[in-house]
Image (cartoon, coloured by chain):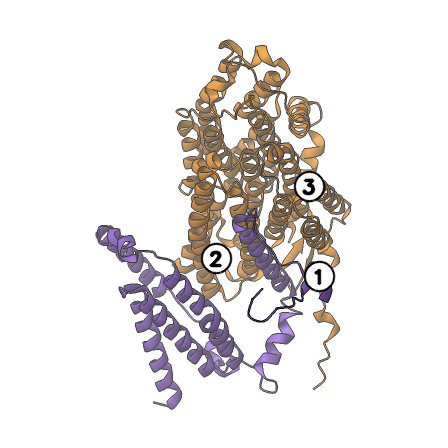
Chain colours: A orange, B purple
Amino acid sequence: MNPSFPPEIVPLFMPAAAEIVLAAGILVLVLVGAFRGEKASAVVNMLATALLIVVAGILIMAPTETVVTFNGAFVADGFGRFMKVLVLLGSLAALLLSRDYLRRDNFDRFEYPILICIAALGMMTMIAANDLIGLYIGLELQNIALYVLATIHRDNARSSEAGLKYFVLSALSSGLLLYGASLVYGFTGSVSYPEIAQAVQGPQGLGVIFGLVFIIAGLAFKMSAVPFHMWTPDVYEGAPTPVTAFLSSAPKIAAMAMSIRILVEAFPGITREWQQIIAFISVASMLLGAFGAIGQANIKRMMAYSSIGNMGYGLVGIAAGTVEGMQGVAIYLAIYLAMTLGVFACIQGMRTENGRPELIADLAGLARTSPGRAMFFAALMFSLIGIPPLAGFFGKFYVFAAAVQAGLYWLAVIGFLTSVVSAVYYLRVIKVMYFDDPRGSFVPMAIGERVVLAVTGVFVLAFWLAPSPLRAAAGVAAKSLFAH
Amino acid sequence: MSVVTAFFYLFSFVAIASSVMVISSRNPVHSVLFLILAFVNAAGLFLILGAEFLAMILVIVYVGAVAVLFLFVVMMLDVNFAELRQGFLQYLPIGALIAGIFLLELLLVLGTWSIAPHLIATPATAAFTPPDISNTRAIGRVLYTKYLFYFQISGFILLTAMIGAIVLTLRHKSGVRRQNVMAQNARSRKTAIEVKQVTSGQGV
């Protein structure tokens, strides 16, 4: 029998050009690393940085229309483009932050930048997934790379503990997600989002909702929203700081993006049902993020609770369920990315001659020992509270405005109140930096940390001068989501 | 009752019973052996469906590789499994409670189950394999075309797992003598062999 294929079986590759280039690049990097051995770390890091920039360039150049390819498994649209660029920026910053850190702590291995790139590939797949199988394999690709990254400081007991905890709990949540996916498949007869959307219209039985609840539980774990947040503080504290910076930036954005896609594109028929679930998760995350962080002494733990709270604010926009809501989330995520990376650049800069203190109290008197750094750090903290005219204010403004437009006044009010509560711990950091007596000074920051801090700091400070480009881009992204 | 139905019940019963034994037997080696039995029965179920390729893959990969690997690990690692299980009874009441609630919810869900009308009308069309080609060929046809994307990403997952395992476990110890093929091949008769004249009765 002659195995000739009808031509329509060969899929379109161009919509996935960015992913294909990234995948091919990763394979080349593995080869470079394997042949150059121990000394390859610096070269591979540089090449990985270049690779991510090229991939982001391809994405930005790509045509804007929505294309579905690979037999419905992969969708390239404006929303995916926006989120993928954010993910790549987060990964790029993680690479910049790690360069010096890894060399100083003597575990500069060439696999580190490669694993970051693989995680980025997994996240891009998650964002582009147009069915449940694509979503799951993208998620697993990302997760496996992240487990290894969290454990990469393998001689450190805390890092190993963080990796193991992350692995076990994440595997559990993947199980929940798969179980939900199997229920949804059983009740709708399809794994592809458009076909699920077609099947799920009008009043639904318990089965689909049941499956959806499990899927949302799995997704909430990935974005560390309450009540699936337990792993976050321990993993953030135990993992090496550049890895924590990475964990709190790019994967969060990817998890949010894929949640938005699955909710809006696969379950538009039961928006009211998932709105309730998302609103609950959002409120719980905002409350826990605000109150949980108050008692923390370790700054990485504090930032873990802060990220839980921030995911809660982002979910407010999703709960609105409208184009404005999704636009708000997109803007919020872009600003969140900048703020988190800036803060982690500062945290990583907390380095003395003989160690890396991680307590908030160790920041004492930073304003006198290095005033420039303290100024940027304070600006980032004010921005996280949401003080106008800093960028963080606009992020919260757009999601809360969307919630109010959708009639969810109470959600916006709770968001506002928790922002006030969270001001307590952000202000404490500023107070320690500006009003406490110095305990000794930190060594100068590395070049990568300086670059990340300067870029994010200027972005946060100057965003109000020109908010429209980001708003326009987020608007295009959100519209493309509802177009089909 | 046809032969196929009889075999279906046989395989299913043995599979379920051996799965229960996997988690309840005291000796971990027995657990692994029951796991192998469960895999073989699952392969039998695939055979009934007409998916002989999957059945063979299941036997080769799961029984031949994975389960044997498990067996090695269980035998080589000196883990006291009885000690690990000690907390088991302590958590049984709360676990049973949650399992009970969950079962109740599942029953509620299954109560709403309805089969799409077109499936009831034509149950025969849900055949596992196209009639004219073997199912190995059928899988091959879709795996590299229709499911190309999944296939490639799965490959990447395996690559990542491999890189991860190496990153986390490989250590370059100093003083380990590695094989050096170049040096071995460069040895000639002159450098490798020393001919000694041994005088009889005196030794070297």
Q: Residue at x 61, y 87 (%)?
A: B132
Q: Residue at x 63, y 75 (%)?
A: B140
Query: Residue A445, image x and y in percent?
Result: 63, 23
Query: Residue B154, image x and y in percent?
Result: 59, 61
**Label 1 element class:** helix
Question: Callout 1: 10 Å neighbours few (<14), some, many (20+)?
Answer: few
In this rendering, the label closer to the viewer, 2 or 3: 3
Residue A264 shows up from this direction: no
The image's mark for residue B12 is none
Q: Nearer the viewer, residue A219 or A53?
A: A53
Q: Nearer the viewer, residue A281 or B183?
A: B183
| Residue with the mark numbered 3 | A45
As shown in the figure, which amino acid type bears the numbered disc 3? Answer: Asn
Q: Nearer the viewer, residue A136 or A262?
A: A136
Question: Callout 2: 10 Å neighbours few (<14), some, many (20+)?
Answer: few
In this rendering, the label closer to the viewer, 1 or 2: 1
Q: Are marks 2 and 3 on the same chain?
A: yes
**Label 3 element class:** helix
Left or right, A319 with respect to A461, comes to: left
- Quadrant assignment for the C terminus of chain A: bottom right
Q: Is residue B6 above or below residue A97?
A: below
| Residue with the mark numbered 1 | B191
Label 2 to label 3, Cα distance in Å? 52 Å
Q: Chain of mark 2?
A: A
Label 3 to label 1, Cα distance in Å? 44 Å
Q: Is residue B78 above or below residue B40?
A: above
Number of numbered markers: 3
Q: Residue at x 55, y 41 (%)?
A: A252
Q: Nearer the viewer, residue A442 or B13?
A: A442
| Residue with the mark numbered 2 | A202
As shown in the figure, which amino acid type bears the numbered disc 2? Answer: Gly
Q: Chain of mark 1?
A: B
